[in-house]
Amino acid sequence: MPARVGILAIQGDVEAHATALAAAGAEAVQVLREKDLDGLAGLILPGGESTTISKGMDRLGLWEPVREFAASGRPVLGTCAGAILLARETVHHPVPTLGLLDAVAVRNAYGTQVDSFAAPVDPGARHDLEGLRCVFIRAPQLEQLGPGVEVYARVDGRPVLVRQANLWAATFHPELTADPRIHQLLLPPPGQLT
Ligand code: GLN
């Protein structure tokens, strides 16, 4: 049976993540209520607009259920706005966050001049991520990383994929390239029962 992976479906790049999960061999489940989290192997907080997603979290009462999901040790991947929502703090139009990832997220950190761009990760990326191409759309930057936060990939020397135990944060949009490697990080190794 394919692993079932949730996508927080309040706003943002939900469909593209579902397609990417299917390509990585997982079943995508849209999450809008606490009970949607039952039985999931992992959870994606998609890119979009963190202010809107944060308001939806308030409205749907999802802050604590998502924190509990993360505390269960199952993998959680936040991409772009989702990475902002994981952070302990945000700067530039601060938004309420889950406060789980020991990092500060600087929103729209690339400014208006380079709103959107694509770039390969720097050589020396971890875990077979060499050659990964990253699409950035009004992307944040992650700063002041705590000691438990490991950098897996950088672009121009800045961290773009980090991990803290079961939490993953990507400042780019892995669902917009055909490369399944980031979504595969959420899946159990082949051969392991889900
Ligand atoms: N700029 C958006 C924010 O601050 C994030 C952009 C994105 O997710 N592509 O919420």
Image (cartoon, rainbow, N blue to C red):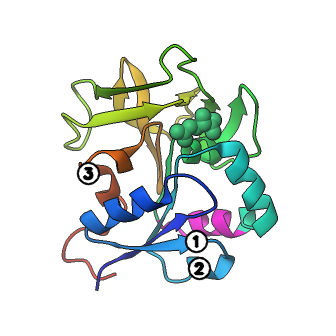
Q: Which part of the image, by quadrant, shows the N terminus?
A: bottom left
Q: Secondary structure at mark 3?
A: helix
- Is residue 68 one of those drawn in magenta? yes
Q: Quadrant of residue 31?
A: bottom right
- Residue 21, compared with residue 111, is above or below; it is below
Mostly what secondary structure, the magenta segment? helix
Residue 11 coordinates in the image, percent (x, y): 61, 56
Residue at 49 percent of width and 53 percent of height: 13
Q: Residue at x 52, y 53 (%)?
A: 46
Contact between labelled residues 2 and 1, with CB atoms less than 8 Å apart: yes
Q: Which residue corresponds to mark 1?
A: 31
The C terminus sits in image quarter: bottom left
Residue 112 vs residue 89, the one in the foreground:
112
Residue 42 in the image: x percent, y percent?
Answer: 45, 68
Q: Is residue 63 above or below residue 136?
A: below
Marks 3 and 1, the one that precedes in the sequence = 1
- Residue 5 lies in the magenta stretch: no
Q: Which residue is mark 2?
A: 36
User: In this figure, which residue is indicated by the disc labeled 3?
Assistant: 181
Amino acid type at mark 2: Asp
What's the residue type where badge 1 is placed? Val
Image: magenta residue range:
65-74
Q: Residue at x 40, y 65 (%)?
A: 18
Q: Position of residue 123 (x, y in %)?
A: 21, 25
**Residue 26: image location, x then y, percent:** 32, 72
